[in-house]
Image: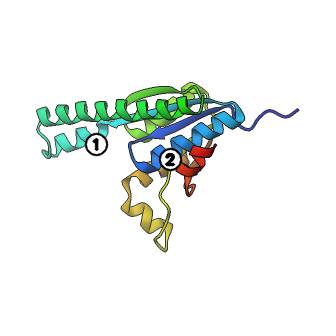
Amino acid sequence: MIKPLFQKIVVAINGSDQSLHAAMYAILLAKQYKCSLKAVYVVDTAALKFLSMSKFFLKTESQKYEENLLNDGKKYLEQVVTFANVKGVKVETELRKGSPWSEILHVADDFGADLILLGGKEHLASSLSSEVARDRASSTNMDIIGSARCNVLVVRQKDIEKLFKIG
């Protein structure tokens, strides 16, 4: 018998609808294939540091903004746990600080992930490169895709909310 293609899944959460859809997809995969699942949210302290150094934020503003992002991260991870509970799936969560792409890769390595799931937008533009150039989240996705030691799946499943309800 061959080894399953994936047993441990990491899903990146950033609060966008796309990342929450990726979480739903990950939960369905974990349920169907009996996989371990971990959801991770990263507060982009690298960007906050850049904004502070460029005088866009005062230090106190940056700290307050970071606190808000940490609270948002907790809220989004709790939402993923709620989704998972509805489907009877156990999910670990982790809240990190740093550069999102780097921290997601560290979590995947530490967890021994076979698969990373990322949220992706449906492409309405004529070219992928023009879409990526305009979308910071896609830049992070490209960094993860280019550097991951395991497979990466960008979730663009249409009607995932409907599938999640019936799955």
Mark 1 vs mark 2: give the one in front.
Answer: 2
For marks 1 and 2, the one nearer the N-term is 2
Give the residue furthest to the bottom. 126
Residue for point 80% across, 32% down: 3
Q: Position of residue 18 (x, y in %)?
A: 46, 50
Q: Which label number is shown at residue 21? A: 2
Q: In the rendered view, would you say 110 is above or below 140?
A: above
Task: Tell me whether circle 1 and circle 2 mark residues in contact (CB < 8 Å).
Answer: no
Q: Nearer the viewer, residue 160 or 144?
A: 160
Give the residue furthest to the front. 166
Q: In the rendered view, would you say 167 is above or below 106?
A: below
Q: Amino acid at mark 1?
A: Ala
Residue for point 59% across, 33% down: 87
| Residue 118 left/right relative to 43 | right
The residues tagged by marks 1 and 2 sit, at their Cα atoms, a distance apart of: 25 Å
Which structural element holds mark 2? helix
Residue carrying label 1 = 47
Question: How many residues crowd mark 2 within 10 Å: few (<14), some (14–19), many (20+)?
Answer: many
Q: Amino acid at mark 2?
A: His
Q: Position of residue 133 (x, y in %)?
A: 40, 62
